[in-house]
Image (spheres, rainbow, N blue to C red):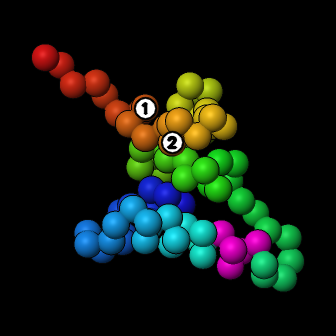
Amino acid sequence: LWDMISYKAAQEADLDTRVRMQAVSLATVMLGQGIAFDQQGSELLRSKSFTRDSYDSGDWFNRVDYSLQDNNYNVGMPRSSD
């Protein structure tokens, strides 16, 4: 969800606005009727580096950092060579 918000939100939207978009999106699903489906780490602003299908990417790519120090962005991107 965080990757989609980062991609589709207006460039003028600051970090606080994007975090609010995430919270409202999750609240809409969680407070709706029926069984809510949510990916692990969405509440922590977890990123998958804009990868649509990371099923076979391994645990290092799909990990969730509960210390709130990292949102996993840029983990799957190729490293720049110097």
Q: Residue at x 31, y 28 (%)?
A: 78
Q: Which residues lie in the magenta part?
A: 26-30
> Dividing the picture into quarters, in which one does residue 42 lie?
bottom right
Q: Position of residue 58 (x, y in %)?
A: 58, 27
Do callouts 2 and 1 mark residues in contact (Cβ within 8 Å)?
no
Task: Using residue 62 as the reference point, say whether residue 12 is left or right of it.
Answer: left
Task: Using residue 73 as the reference point, say whether residue 27 is left or right of it.
Answer: right
At label 2, which amino acid type do we have?
Answer: Asn
Task: Using residue 32 as the reference point, say whether residue 9 is left or right of it.
Answer: left
Residue at the extreme top: 82
For residue 65, the mark is none
Q: Residue at x 49, y 58 (%)?
A: 2
Seen from the viewer's position, the closer of residues 41 and 76 is: 41
The kind of secondary structure element at disc 1 is: loop
Position of the N terminus by quadrant: bottom right
Q: Residues within 10 Å of mark 2 (few under 14, many from 20)?
A: many
What whole-number distance in Å separates the C-alpha atoms at marks 2 and 1? Answer: 9 Å
